[in-house]
Image: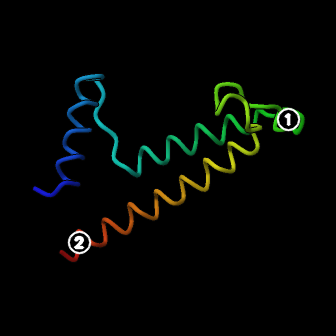
């Protein structure tokens, strides 16, 4: 078993222990739910609200707009990493 498979199995085990009545999500399902939730939350912000500091995120040093932008860039980078790992595993 590779390190990635072992880590995935560990995460699945933890998820089952925390919420045994809910089936674990696939990466695609998790990405869809996270994106949908973030999109819904962003739509509630006004342009004024986007410029306010986001408390609890880096001690309020980022505005909501800056945080959303950074989150999206990181999200895209992680999705790229996941796709690259899947491609490597497929060809291994």
Q: Answer whether labels 1 and 2 touch (C-beta < 8 Å).
A: no
Please determine whether, in this image, residue 54 is positioned above or below residue 26.
above
Identify the element where label 2 is drawn: helix
The residue that label 2 is drawn on is 90
Q: Residue at x 76, y 43 (%)?
A: 65
- Number of residue marks: 2
| Residue sitting at the far bottom | 91
Relative depth, front residue between 35 and 13? 13
**Residue at coordinates 24% horizontally, 46% vertically from top-left?**
8
Q: Is residue 79 left or right of residue 73?
A: left
Q: Nearer the viewer, residue 82 or 21?
A: 82
| Crowdedness near tag 2: few (<14), some (14–19) or many (≥20) residues, C-alpha within 10 Å | few
Callout 1 secondary element? loop
Residue 71 % position (x, y): 61, 47
Crowd tier of the residue under label 1, counting other residues whose Cα lies within 10 Å: few below 14, some 14–19, many 20 or above: few
**Measured from the top left, where is residue 53 in percent x and y?**
78, 31
Q: Is residue 87 above or below residue 33?
A: below
Q: Which residue is pictured at 49% across the width and 47% down the height?
A: 32
Q: Which residue is mark 1?
A: 46
The colour scheme used here is rainbow
Q: Nearer the viewer, residue 32 or 10?
A: 10
Give the CA distance from mark 1 to mark 2. 44 Å
N-terminal label among 1 and 2: 1
């Amino acid at each position: 078993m590779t390190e990635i498979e072992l880590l995935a199995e560990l995460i699945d085990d933890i998820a089952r222990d925390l919420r045994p009545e809910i089936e674990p999500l696939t990466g695609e399902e998790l990405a869809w739910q996270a994106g949908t939730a973030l999109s819904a939350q962003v739509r509630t912000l006004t342009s004024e609200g986007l410029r306010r500091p986001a408390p609890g995120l880096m001690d309020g040093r980022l505005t909501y707009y800056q945080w959303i932008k950074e989150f999206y860039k990181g999200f895209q980078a992680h999705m790229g990493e996941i796709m690259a790992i899947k491609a490597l595993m497929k060809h291994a």
